[in-house]
Amino acid sequence: MQPNGGINTRNTINRMAEAMRSIGDGCTKEDLKLKGFSDHQIEVFGKKATELATAMAHAA
């Protein structure tokens, strides 16, 4: 499920992935909430953001 399916979705996933990378291993839902993400955003975009963060880390 991707609301809008457009630029807002991609931006949210990118921002969340970058937040995950900055936090590092062991990033939790609470860590993301402290970075300003809502429970709903974490639920909807968390899996894709995790995949992206992992790919970004391997590419670095």
Image (spheres, helix red, strand yellow):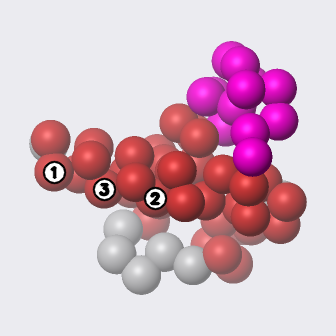
Q: Residue at x 36, y 68 (%)?
A: 24
Assess whether residue 6 is covered by the magenta stretch: yes
Query: Could you tell me which residue is drawn at 68 percent across and 18 percent down?
Result: 7
- What is the quadrant of residue 31 in the picture? bottom right
- Residue 13 versus residue 21: which sits nearer the camera? 13
Disc 1: which residue: 58
Q: Amino acid at mark 3?
A: Thr
- Using the rendered image of the protein, determine whether residue 25 is visible from the camera's viewpoint: yes
Pick whichever, 13 or 23, lies toward us. Answer: 13
Q: CA distance from mark 1 to mark 2?
A: 12 Å
Q: Residue at x 49, y 75 (%)?
A: 27
Q: Are marks 3 and 2 in contact (CB under 8 Å)?
A: yes
Q: Which residues, given as a range, are shown in magenta?
A: 1-12
Residues tagged 1 and 2 counted as in contact (Cβ below 8 A)? no
Instruction: Using the rendered view, name the quadrant where residue 60 is placed.
Output: top left
Amino acid type, mark 2: Thr
| Numbered disc 3: secondary structure | helix
Query: Where residue 13 sits: x, y (%)?
Result: 59, 41
- What residue did someone put label 2 on? 50
Q: Quadrant of residue 51?
A: bottom left
Badge 3 vs badge 1, beta-carbon distance below 8 Å: yes
Is residue 19 something one can see in this rendering? no
- Mark 3, residue position: 54
Is disc 2 placed on a helix, strand or loop? helix
